[in-house]
């Protein structure tokens, strides 16, 4: 728990600064471009993120699980080849994602941005995908080697650089193209520094020739690694429907203005997420260590402590925003036109209260060897949610989208937490030795 709090502290410091800077960026962009402009920018950035996640195999989780496992068991060569394999697979996926963005940009501009002439902005911002060729694998490796302070520092540097450029665009009364370029420069610099840091760390731990480690070492684990990567990819792809692509649905059915309301509400909700968002990254390596040694009670203790802290914080902030949310919006954006975001904010907070309380639901199932369970749950919820989106969002707009978003979080998180406790209970029973009186026929 001390390591979790220490590493969460590093990430929270960075996340806190980054979230505050991100909020300042959103405020400056909102004041410069208005509600519709903010909605358009959100549509562009979310579209690129959705396409990238659709192709991505979430290599951060694979690297943490398997590089972490082989590092703990002293098998450094297999640890090195897992990272090499993950980085190469991620590189191929990133290139494929960018090509897909170029192919879909005209459609996105026509149906999401409602202006076919803006297709070039989608391609321009899509260059971020190429800059992040192996960022997921790099992040996972730095977490395995406990380099949270370095990750935190890089996040802060990237956020400050982006803010400086956006502030310059704001004071010079720039336009959306310059805003997109500002985000592109900041994220590209951050991604490149992250990659260099990870490769340096790999050389330090495995030697200068680590990348020559043969792939044949992983032949016995090839099926397991593939299953894990495909399961996490399917889960991430389903999340595009269930939570990551919300803004795109609103933009498609209702236009950039309501997308701006939704984006405003989400920006404020992200502040609530700020102290909680580092916890999964800090908790995942720790529960993996406990699981590697079959310390199931220790793992349960870690999950319980995290649940109490995250849930208590979120409840307190939700009560505050329920009372003063409108004043917060007016204070930040200086424009009553943003106030329709308040009802969406309240609806989202209900879902985030449950999601934050059980923030560990997905990483716990990955640790317990059940990456398929969230995928199955997300598949069922995706079907239900698509039906809800098609029926409700065209009629009720961004508020219906917020309600579906909250409902997804409540259902998926609760089911995953229940499954985690069920598996832990079974493994604790299996790990508990039977009393002497139950072994054989003991006689006095």
Image (cartoon, rainbow, N blue to C red):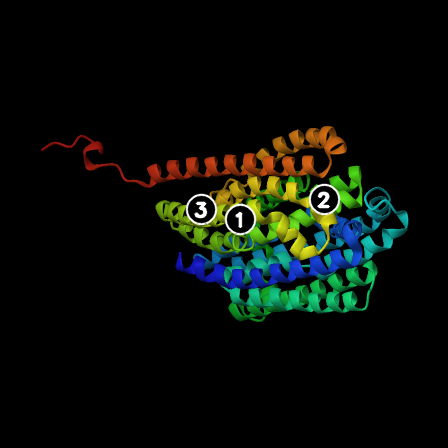
- Distance between mark 1 and mark 3 Cα atoms: 20 Å
Foreground residue among 340 and 178: 340
Q: Which numbered disc, 1 or 3, marks the residue that appears first in the sequence?
A: 3
Q: Which numbered disc, 2 or 1, marks the residue that appears first in the sequence?
A: 2
Q: Is residue 279 left or right of residue 379?
A: left
Q: Is residue 74 left or right of residue 371?
A: left
From the viewer's perspective, is residue 332 above or below residue 230?
below
- The percent coordinates of residue 430 (x first, y second) are 34, 37
Q: Which residue is mark 1?
A: 320
From the viewer's perspective, is residue 63 above or below residue 348?
below
Identify the disc placed on residue 395.
Answer: none
Q: Is residue 215 left or right of residue 246?
A: left
Q: Which numbered disc, 3 or 2, marks the residue that appears first in the sequence?
A: 2
Q: Is residue 54 left or right of residue 359?
A: right
Q: Quadrant of the C terminus?
A: top left
- Judge depth for marks 1 and 3 and give the one in front: 1
The 10 Å Cα crowd at callout 1, few under 14, some 14 to 19, many 20 or more, is few
- Distance between mark 2 and mark 1 Cα atoms: 25 Å
Residue at the limit of the structure toward the right, as seen here: 117
From the viewer's perspective, is residue 346 above or below residue 178?
above
From the viewer's perspective, is residue 2 above or below residue 266?
below
């Amino acid at each position: 728990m001390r390591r979790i709090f220490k590493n969460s502290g590093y990430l929270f410091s960075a996340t806190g600064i980054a979230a505050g800077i991100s909020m300042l960026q959103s405020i400056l962009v909102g004041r410069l471009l208005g509600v519709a402009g903010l909605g358009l920018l959100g549509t562009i950035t979310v579209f690129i993120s959705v396409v990238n996640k659709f192709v991505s195999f979430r290599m951060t989780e694979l690297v943490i699980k398997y590089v972490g496992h082989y590092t703990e068991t002293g098998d450094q060569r297999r640890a090195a080849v897992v990272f090499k394999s993950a980085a190469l697979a991620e590189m191929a996926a990133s290139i494929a994602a960018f090509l897909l963005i170029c192919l879909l940009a005209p459609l996105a501009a026509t149906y999401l941005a409602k202006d076919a002439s803006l297709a070039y902005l989608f391609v321009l911002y899509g260059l971020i995908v190429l800059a992040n060729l192996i960022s997921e694998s790099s992040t996972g490796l730095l977490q395995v080697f406990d380099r949270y302070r370095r990750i935190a520092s890089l996040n802060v540097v990237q956020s400050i650089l982006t803010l400086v450029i956006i502030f310059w665009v704001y004071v010079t009364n720039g336009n959306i193209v310059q805003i997109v370029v500002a985000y592109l420069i900041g994220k590209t610099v951050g991604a490149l520094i992250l990659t260099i840091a990870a490769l340096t760390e790999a050389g330090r731990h495995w030697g200068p020739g680590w990348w020559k480690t043969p792939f044949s070492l992983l032949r016995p684990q090839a099926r397991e690694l593939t299953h894990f990567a495909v399961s996490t990819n399917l889960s991430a792809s389903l999340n595009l429907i269930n939570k990551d692509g919300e803004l795109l649905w609103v933009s498609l059915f209702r236009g950039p203005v309501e997308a701006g309301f939704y984006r405003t509400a989400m920006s404020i909700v992200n502040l609530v997420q700020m102290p909680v968002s580092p916890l999964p990254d800090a908790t995942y390596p720790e529960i993996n260590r406990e699981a590697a040694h079959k310390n199931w009670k220790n793992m349960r203790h870690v999950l319980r402590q995290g649940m109490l802290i995250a849930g208590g914080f979120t409840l307190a902030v939700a009560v505050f925003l329920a009372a003063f949310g409108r004043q917060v919006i007016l204070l930040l954006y200086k424009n009553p036109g943003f106030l329709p975001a308040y009802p969406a904010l309240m609806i989202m907070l209900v879902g985030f209260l449950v999601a934050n309380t059980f923030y560990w639901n997905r990483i716990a199932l990955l640790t317990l060897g059940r990456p398929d369970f969230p995928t199955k749950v997300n598949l069922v919820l995706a079907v239900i949610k698509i039906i809800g989106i098609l029926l409700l969002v065209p009629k009720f707009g961004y508020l219906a989208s917020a309600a579906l978003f909250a409902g997804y979080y409540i259902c998926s998180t609760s089911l995953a937490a229940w499954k985690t406790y069920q598996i832990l209970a079974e493994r604790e029973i299996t790990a508990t030795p039977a009393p002497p009186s139950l072994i054989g026929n003991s006689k006095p």
